[in-house]
Amino acid sequence: MGGRSAWVFTFRIEQQRSQTWFLSSDNNQRITPPFGGEFWVDQATGMLLRMRFAAHGIPPTFPTQNVEILTGYANSAFDCGTTFLLPTDANVASVYNGIPTRNIEQFRGCHKFRAKAHMVLQPN
């Protein structure tokens, strides 16, 4: 992947115990379908390179019939000399009421925010 050797891990979530990943419609329907996907990990560094999520088993009466999210990741450098793993781009494809859509997102210009705190304990 991009000249790097990567491991690809697949996963499938048949039933969610919490509504971490859900689909909603215009008429306030909300479902938590089974989903699965893959994630790609750089073999040399162990760094996450890409993740893909796709819904499965969506009821035929639900307006959204297909959803897939593909997100790329890379280390982002900050002015202070540190780096942090952040998403770089995402491709969201779906079919809603028979109409295919695709949103392509790019994440740029991230900023690092930090603060220092000092706690002073005073006896009662």
Image (tube, rainbow, N blue to C red):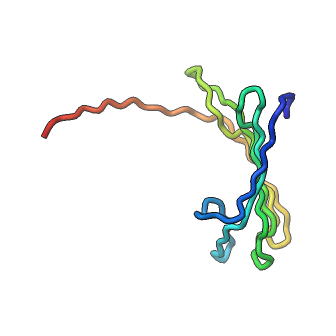
Question: Residue 121: which quarter of the image?
Answer: top left
Between 41 and 70, the one nearer to me in the picture: 41
In the displayed structure, 108 sits above or below 70; it is above
Left or right of 26 on screen, residue 121: left
Q: Quadrant of the N terminus?
A: top right
Q: Position of residue 69 (x, y in %)?
A: 76, 53
Name which quarter of the figure residue 102 lies in. bottom right
Is residue 26 visible from the viewing direction of this image?
Answer: yes
Number of numbered discs visible in the structure rendering? 0
User: Which is nearer the eye, 78 or 60?
Assistant: 60
Furthest-left residue in this view: 124
Figure quadrant of residue 17? bottom right
Res 104 visible: no
Residue 73, placed above or below residue 57: above
Name the residue rendered at 13%, 40% in the picture. 124
In the image, 64 versus 18, the foreground residue is: 18
Residue 77, how many percent across, how many down? 64, 26
The residue at the point 55 percent across, 21 percent down is 80
As drawn, the residue found furthest toward the bottom would be 61
Residue 108 to residue 83: above or below: below
Residue 10, percent across and down?
Answer: 78, 49
Looking at the picture, how far across and down is residue 56, in whole percent? 78, 65
Q: For the view shown, which residue lies furthest in the top direction?
A: 81
